[in-house]
Image: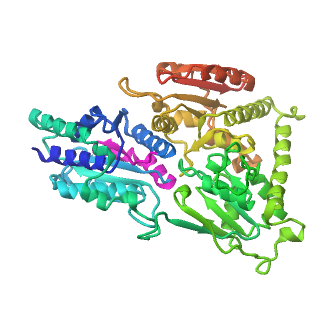
């Protein structure tokens, strides 16, 4: 058997044994041995394979798959396969999001043999295994490496991707670079023998467990605290007077134990929209002592409460941080405050035993400004003060947005204000539905800041909070969850991943509805410091960049069903009609535009 076929088949065996369930391919010749090794596994039902025409979208599809599998309780590293050369570099945006969003991604990058490095050979990077930064680990597998060495490397790679090889690293991406020499295709006899072996694997249910050697060192049994006998690792938190929970995106993990902690100990929850704690209509675990069937500790408009209510902000002594909260500057300032104790807990907190140790009265250590002003810093009154501070701020903000045009307001400013009001209503309407909602960065996720009825299961790419690859990520999320997903996205983010609308004819398309808020450019910059009067001449050309394009024709060209609306009521009608027409073959785009654009 050729060295390339032998190595590729061993990689395939090891991926199955380590529980990898999905592999995404971008076409290429140097990676062909992996196609001939992995595609028969998909035919036998041992894994799922997916194909995209370019590496960038393939990587983001894999990212969404990893998130979806985790969210449905079937966490697995997801592999993405590329050929050599610049194809590898196209994985980088998704690899970076996976690294900072803690998602298990295996970049299987095909390479030429080492003897061709430094010779100017076609599609050959001198050290391709170093191309991708911010990976948890990197491997460079020589051409013709032994089966045992390849097996150990695959096991170590998947363990690193899942964050189970160390006590300190969270899940994230790894690069598994494989040198393939010619011939790159198996002989008919080699392919036939491999398919026969796969039949045996399928019959014995190889995907249900690892080999005896792997079982002994199974990373599924790894314990983050290093204990040999404890059945479950434990996370300890200290609750003082003036304790709050700050929660950001957790990469698809749940946080039921943390929700119960907040209810039982009356802790205000300052949750970003994609945090699992943001949902307001969620039953608490039966173990909760509160007896409440619904969380009542989520603080409305928490960023504005931090900014506008100094008596509450200054009463904070301890912050318990879950996930990655990066959305607002007031929260960032709170976490950077050296006088506040910050306790960070794992994203997958439900996989740990959460215990409270050493509840402390800190009044002798630091005089709470809040107490001086008559603010309780613990118990039901502590939560109530935060919720009651936030509620009128939401009401006032909504009233301000719905007010009539001010004197001297230009038509453009009035149209922008009207569009943002409509966009917020639509966003809040979606948040109140029992759906899975994937939300883009920039204004899309910020429109959710005033939502007080969040029933949707909200996901977002908050690792680096970029706008890359979101259509592909949402499609992967749908395929990973095996359920419909609604993508809420702005027009600039939509244009960034327009290639994500294309799904090859033989591939699963997922069940995705895209709601695109098209305000003709990057409106978020108009609300930042770049909109100051003395900078006005730079704003439109260099920041908001209006493009004057709609998406109906693009939707049709890529095989999606387009609808265009201008108002929130019109949107509710269009979205309600889709609710009764869901099917795995339908893909829909609802474009929301300003009335003057339609």
Nearer to the camera, 292 or 509:
292
Position in image of residue 458 (x %, y %): 61, 42
Residue at x 69% of width, y 56% of height? 329
Which residue is nearer to you in this view: 349 or 386?
349
- The answer to whether residue 330 is visible is no
Question: Is 457 on the left or on the right of 138, as rendered?
Answer: right
Quadrant containing the C terminus in the rendered view: top right
- Name the image quarter holding the N terminus: top left
The answer to whether 150 is drawn above or below residue 466 in the figure is below
Along the horizontal axis of the image, is 257 left or right of 390? left
Q: Is residue 166 above or below residue 422?
A: below
Residue 155 placement: quadrant? bottom left
The residue lying toward the viewer, choosing from 78 and 86, is: 78
Magenta-drawn stretch contains 99: yes
- Locate residue 366: give its quadrant: bottom right
Magenta stretch containing residue 274, yes or no? no
Q: Residue furthest bottom?
A: 364
Q: In the rendering, at what x and y percent does residue 395 appear?
A: 84, 42
Residue extent of the magenta highlight: 74-101
- Point 72% across, 49% down: residue: 295
Image spot of residue 113 (x, y percent): 18, 51
């Amino acid at each position: 058997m050729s060295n390339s076929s032998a190595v590729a088949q061993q990689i395939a065996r090891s991926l199955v044994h380590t529980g990898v369930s999905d592999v995404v391919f971008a076409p290429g010749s140097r990676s062909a041995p992996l196609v001939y090794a992995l595609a028969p596994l998909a035919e036998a039902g041992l894994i799922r394979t997916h194909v995209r025409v370019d590496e960038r979208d393939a990587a983001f599809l894999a990212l969404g798959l990893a998130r979806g599998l985790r969210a449905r309780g079937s966490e697995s590293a997801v592999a993405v396969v590329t050929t050599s050369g610049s194809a590898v570099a196209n994985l980088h945006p998704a690899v970076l999001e996976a690294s900072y969003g803690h998602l298990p991604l295996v970049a299987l990058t095909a390479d030429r043999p080492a003897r061709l490095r430094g010779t100017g050979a076609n599609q050959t990077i001198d050290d391709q295994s170093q191309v991708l930064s911010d990976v948890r680990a990197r491997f460079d597998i020589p051409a013709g490496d032994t089966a045992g060495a390849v097996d150990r490397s695959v096991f170590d790679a998947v363990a690193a991707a899942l964050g189970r090889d160390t006590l300190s690293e969270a899940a994230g991406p790894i690069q598994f670079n494989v040198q393939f020499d010619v011939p790159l295709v198996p002989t008919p006899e080699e392919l036939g023998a491999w398919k026969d072996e796969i039949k045996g694997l399928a019959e014995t249910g190889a995907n249900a467990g690892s080999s005896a050697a792997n079982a002994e060192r199974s990373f599924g049994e790894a314990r983050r605290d290093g204990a040999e006998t404890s059945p479950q690792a434990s996370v300890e938190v200290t609750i003082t007077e003036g304790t709050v929970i700050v929660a950001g995106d957790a990469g698809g993990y749940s946080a039921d134990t943390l929700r119960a902690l907040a209810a039982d100990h009356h802790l205000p929850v300052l949750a970003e929209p994609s945090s699992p704690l943001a949902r307001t209509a969620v039953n608490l675990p039966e173990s909760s002592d509160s007896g409440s069937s619904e969380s009542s500790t989520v603080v409305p408009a928490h960023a504005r409460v931090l900014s506008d209510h100094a008596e509450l902000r200054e009463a904070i002594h301890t912050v318990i941080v879950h996930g990655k909260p990066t959305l607002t500057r007031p929260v960032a300032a709170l976490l950077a405050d050296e006088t506040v104790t910050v306790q960070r807990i794992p994203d997958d907190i439900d996989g740990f035993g959460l215990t409270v140790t050493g509840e402390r009265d800190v009044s002798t250590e630091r005089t709470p400004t809040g107490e001086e002003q008559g603010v309780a810093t613990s118990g039901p009154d502590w939560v109530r003060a935060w919720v009651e501070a936030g509620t009128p701020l939401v009401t006032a903000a909504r009233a301000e947005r719905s007010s009539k045009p001010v004197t001297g307001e230009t038509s453009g400013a009035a149209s922008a204000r009207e569009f943002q009001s409509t966009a917020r209503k639509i966003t809040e309407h979606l948040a109140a539905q029992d759906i899975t909602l994937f939300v883009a960065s920039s204004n899309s996720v910020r429109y959710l800041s005033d939502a007080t009825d969040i029933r949707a299961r909200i996901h977002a790419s908050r690792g680096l909070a970029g706008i890359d690859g979101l259509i592909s990520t949402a499609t992967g999320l749908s395929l990973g969850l095996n359920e419909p997903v609604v993508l809420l996205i702005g027009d600039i983010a939509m244009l960034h991943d327009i290639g994500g609308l294309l799904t090859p004819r033989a591939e699963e398309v997922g069940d995705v509805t895209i709601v695109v808020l098209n305000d003709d450019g990057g409106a978020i910059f108009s609300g930042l410091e770049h909109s100051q009067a003395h900078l006005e001449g730079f704003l439109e050309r260099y920041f908001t960049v209006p493009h004057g394009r709609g998406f109906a024709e693009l939707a049709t060209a890529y095989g999606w069903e387009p609808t265009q609306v201008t108002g929130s009521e019109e949107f509710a009608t269009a979205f309600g009609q889709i609710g009764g027409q869901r099917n795995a073959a339908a893909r829909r785009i609802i474009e929301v535009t300003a009335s003057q654009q339609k």
